[in-house]
């Protein structure tokens, strides 16, 4: 038997192969066992094909600050083009530490408490692979960002979830408690939360810490939208009592600086945990993007005004799109943070024209020239059922696109009649 067919037979017999568990966790595995695309790739491709307004994948269509882009060009011109250290360039780790002190009063040591990763995505993967394996449970909220399910699958751990229900999308404390067990090794919190836009209350975060202590679990928080909140302050878990000593915090330059393609992320936390994650991260990418790391080191030093301004600008865009969605007849759940707003399309589903929410999202670009992400794509089957009628719309787009997108969405009820 050739090595390839041996691999294939392992993959198709009984236990799932690691790649199959990954694909299953990310809802990529079709009934025929073939791989699909992530929901973001699939919907973006449909948007391009139909020349639709892409309110699906969360990337801004305007670049970030010119001075940060210039800093990357300068870094290239000045010869910062070879491998960065595995931990990340010192200037960036120092800038991350300074940023955490400025905004949150935290004082991580840049040498021992911080590592740079290839976007938050690699940070999440390295953390879960370092800390969890078969027999462990990783607890997340549901809906959950797609890479969580995928990497938990790769690690061989079991993915447990606690639902976030409309309209508040806060977990029920009793359900949260019931979701923990002696096998819970990691509780993975995403705050502000993609796709619901929830900024969790201090009570919720305190409960997570209390339960993590009780069950001796590590808290991993994905805070990539830390600066994108509307009228509420972001509270890092690591700033709450009992949080810092058991929390790995993950963030990224992509969203804060509107350079999602640069893939500069970072992790901070207790030395022992960071060292474990670094061991795995070293053999994933070793290091990446030296000139981009140099530029983000400068970016993190931007004045307070910059940070206030990005949130205010985005809040206005959120209102433009939310108003448009409401006028188009959808129930809209007001997000407190992130790039995203959720709208309920239940009346459209009742028309019988679509088999389910996923089908609606797939047809939308062709029907009216707008693309959005179906919330069931962020769920296990039971949660997908519960969230069947919800669509996620991204408002990190130009005002013209938001207005035109809303105008087209208003036609949907007529098109579907
Ligand atoms: N976590 C969440 C919740 C996200 O929405 C995203 C997309 N930005 C990521 C992680 C991935 O971040 P990055 O692009 O830095 O890998
Ligand atoms: N984070 C982005 C979103 O939620 C997508 C990133 C990706 O395509 N993997 O839309």
Image (cartoon, grey):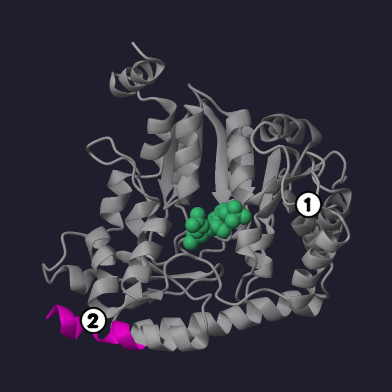
- Asked whether the residues under the numbered discs 2 and 1 touch, taking CB atoms below 8 Å apart as contact, a structural biologist would say no
Give the structural element (helix, strand or loop) at label 2: helix
At label 1, counting other C-alpha atoms closer than 10 Å, the crowd grade (few under 14, some 14-19, many 20 or more) is: many
Instruction: Name the front one of labels 2 and 1.
Output: 1
Task: Name which residue lies at 63% across and 50% down.
Answer: 120
Front position in the image: 397 or 188: 397
Residue tagged by mark 1? 290
Pick the front one: 320 or 88: 88
Q: Is residue 355 magenta?
A: no
Q: Position of residue 207 (x, y in %)?
A: 58, 47
Asked whether residue 413 is drawn in magenta, I would say yes
Q: CA distance from mark 2 to mark 1?
A: 46 Å
Residue denoted by label 2: 412
Quadrant hosting residue 415: bottom left
Left or right position of 372 against 211? left
**Residue 328 visible in the shown view:** no
* Range shown magenta: 407-417
């Amino acid at each position: 038997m050739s090595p390839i067919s041996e691999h294939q037979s392992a993959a198709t017999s009984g236990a799932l192969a690691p790649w199959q568990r990954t694909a299953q966790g990310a809802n990529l595995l079709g009934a025929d066992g073939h791989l699909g695309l992530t929901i973001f790739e699939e919907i973006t491709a449909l948007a391009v094909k139909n020349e639709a307004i892409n309110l699906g994948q969360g990337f801004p269509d305007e670049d970030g600050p010119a001075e940060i882009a210039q800093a990357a060009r300068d870094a290239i011109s000045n010869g910062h083009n070879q491998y960065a250290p595995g931990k990340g360039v010192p200037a960036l780790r120092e800038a991350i530490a300074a940023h955490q002190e400025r905004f949150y009063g935290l004082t991580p040591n840049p040498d021992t408490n911080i590592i740079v990763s290839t976007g938050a995505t690699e940070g999440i993967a390295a953390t879960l692979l370092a800390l969890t394996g078969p027999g462990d449970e990783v607890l997340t909220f549901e809906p959950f960002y797609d890479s969580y399910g995928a990497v938990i699958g790769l690690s061989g751990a079991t993915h447990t979830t606690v639902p976030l229900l409309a309209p508040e999308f806060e977990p029920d404390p009793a359900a949260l408690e019931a979701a923990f067990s002696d096998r819970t090794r990691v509780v993975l919190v995403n705050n502000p939360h993609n796709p619901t836009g929830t900024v969790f209350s201090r009570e919720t975060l305190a409960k997570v810490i209390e339960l993590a202590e009780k069950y001796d679990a590590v808290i991993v928080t994905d805070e990539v939208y830390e600066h994108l909140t509307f009228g509420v302050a972001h509270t890092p878990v690591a700033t709450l009592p009992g949080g810092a000593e058991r929390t790995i915090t993950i963030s990224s330059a992509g969203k804060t600086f509107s350079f999602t393609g640069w893939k500069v992320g970072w992790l901070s936390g207790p030395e022992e945990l960071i060292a474990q994650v670094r061991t795995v991260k070293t053999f994933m990418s070793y290091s990446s993007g030296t000139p981009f790391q140099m530029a983000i080191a400068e970016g993190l030093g931007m004045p307070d005004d910059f940070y206030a301004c990005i949130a205010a600008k985005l809040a206005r865009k959120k209102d433009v799109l939310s108003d448009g969605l409401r006028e188009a007849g959808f129930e809209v759940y007001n997000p407190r943070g992130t790039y995203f707003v959720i709208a309920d399309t239940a009346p459209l589903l009742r028309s019988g024209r679509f088999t389910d929410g996923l089908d609606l999202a797939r047809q939308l670009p062709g029907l009216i020239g707008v693309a959005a992400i179906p919330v069931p794509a962020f769920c296990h089957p039971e949660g997908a059922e519960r969230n069947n009628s919800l669509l996620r719309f991204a408002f990190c787009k130009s005002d013209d696109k938001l207005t035109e997108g809303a105008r087209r969405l208003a036609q949907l009820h007529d098109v579907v009649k």
